[in-house]
Image: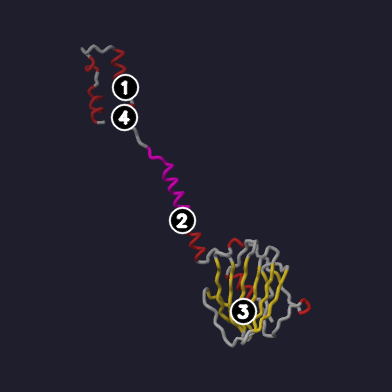
Amino acid sequence: MDELNRLRSMMKEETFKNHGFTEKMRKNILKEIHSDKGKSPIIKKPLLAPVLSSVFMLACLTVFIYFGGTQLGLFQGMNNAGQIDFTKMEWTDNDGDAKWSEQIELPTLVPFEVVDRTYKNTHMDEYDMVSIKLMGPEKQRLTIIMDVGIESGTPAMYEQVKIGDVTGSYRFNEEWKNSHLVWFKGGIMYYLDYTPGTSGIVLDKGDMKRIAESFQK
């Protein structure tokens, strides 16, 4: 670049005298030297690379936040917005809904329309185990198991959840998308288990708590 500048400064009219240059040759040489072709090109950095880099970083951050939030339970049930249709549940002896014990409480709210139900009562050495399975139209299943006659009980603690004046334990199985809630009250250990079937609707801790708090005698 310095050499070119020096050459330009030297290329005066006197340079071409007595050297056999024609007027046309002189003009062409001067035109070439003083043109922009001899200047160093300005290298523009491509914009595509930083844009793609920013998009990639944003995508990675989004994935990190989502999966991190899922592990922390921040996004569980968010896909259920407006989809869970809690239905009032009525229990009558006329339909075979025998309670087997006056101690038993049963839910008055369930997360789907019940199309079928099954019952099982097993007498153990020290207590009775009552099992009720409620089925929904999309193979959803809400299973209620009650160990009746237990003097005391403490459910294994996963995520603590307050159900009225007692403390229960909630856990979510990511593989099977089923929710599980356990609590002890009035001589009965209650187990509440929900499986989404083909509905694709999962229940989070708040949903399970709502069902548990609807239990009445």
Q: Are marks 2 and 3 in contact (CB under 8 Å)?
A: no
Give the overall secondary structure of the magenta segment: helix
Task: Please state the extent of the stretch shown in magenta in the rendering.
Answer: 44-60
Residue 125 x %, y %: 62, 87
**Residue on which disc 4 sits:** 39
Q: Earlier in the sequence, mark 4 or mark 3?
A: 4
**Residue on which disc 1 sits:** 32
Q: Residues within 10 Å of mark 4 (few under 14, many from 20)?
A: few
Cα distance between the residues tagged 4 and 3:
85 Å
Which residue appears at 42% of the width and 45% of the height? 50
What's the amino acid at mark 1? Glu
Cα distance between the residues tagged 2 and 4:
44 Å
Cα distance between the residues tagged 3 and 1:
94 Å
Nearest the viewer among 208 and 119 is: 119
Q: Are marks 3 and 1 in contact (CB under 8 Å)?
A: no
Cα distance between the residues tagged 1 and 2:
53 Å
What's the amino acid at mark 2? Leu
Q: Earlier in the sequence, mark 4 or mark 1?
A: 1
Nearest the viewer among 90 and 114 is: 114
